[in-house]
Amino acid sequence: MEGTNFHKRLKTLINDYVLLSYKTSEKFSKSEIYGMTSQVRRAVLSVMLNYIEGYGRTKKGLLIQFYETSFASLKESIYVFYLAVQLKYISATEYQKLFTVKEEIARMLWKTLDGLRDDKNTST
């Protein structure tokens, strides 16, 4: 597993993504308050909450499960923003900013998952 600075950076990026997502989702149509707005906010919170919960686990299988859920929620959230561009709730520039942060988080999570899977496969 990666070092403490790596995970501190990843946690900071996820937090930045959550904050940016909340701010951006304020621009969605008011008719989406119980639809897209609620869904994307749940998804971005899931990215952070599953990451944190996974980081607190000692069993590799559970850690992997939480990190995979975090990764899946990240993918889910970016689709909502993609749809928001198509519906003209947000601009392509706003989407690109979210996408760029999402990509860095995704790379870091995937790298962590690969390392955990390698460790798990060599220790069994």
Image (cartoon, rainbow, N blue to C red):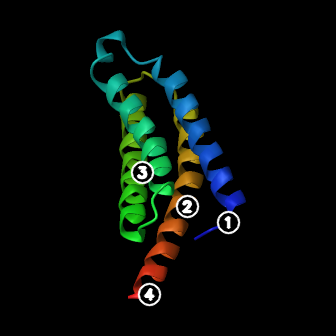
Q: Which mark's residue is nearer the viewer, 2 or 1?
A: 1
Furthest toward the top, the residue is 30
Instruction: Find residue 123 and name its label.
Output: 4
Q: Residue at x 60, y 47 (%)?
A: 11
Instruction: Find residue 3 and name its label.
Output: 1
Q: Is residue 38 left or right of residue 102?
A: left
Instruction: Report the amino acid beneath label 3.
Output: Ser
Q: Which residue is mark 3?
A: 70
Q: Which residue is mark 2?
A: 107
Q: CA distance from mark 2 to mark 3?
A: 12 Å
Q: Which mark's residue is nearer the viewer, 3 or 4?
A: 4
Instruction: Find residue 88 and name its label.
Output: none
Q: Is residue 33 left or right of residue 56?
A: left
Q: Residue at x 57, y 30 (%)?
A: 20
Q: CA distance from mark 2 to mark 1?
A: 15 Å
Up-down: is 88 above or below 110? Answer: above
Mark 1 closeness class: few <14, some 14–19, many ≥20 residues within 10 Å: few
Instruction: Report the amino acid beneath label 1.
Output: Gly
Q: Earlier in the sequence, mark 3 or mark 4?
A: 3
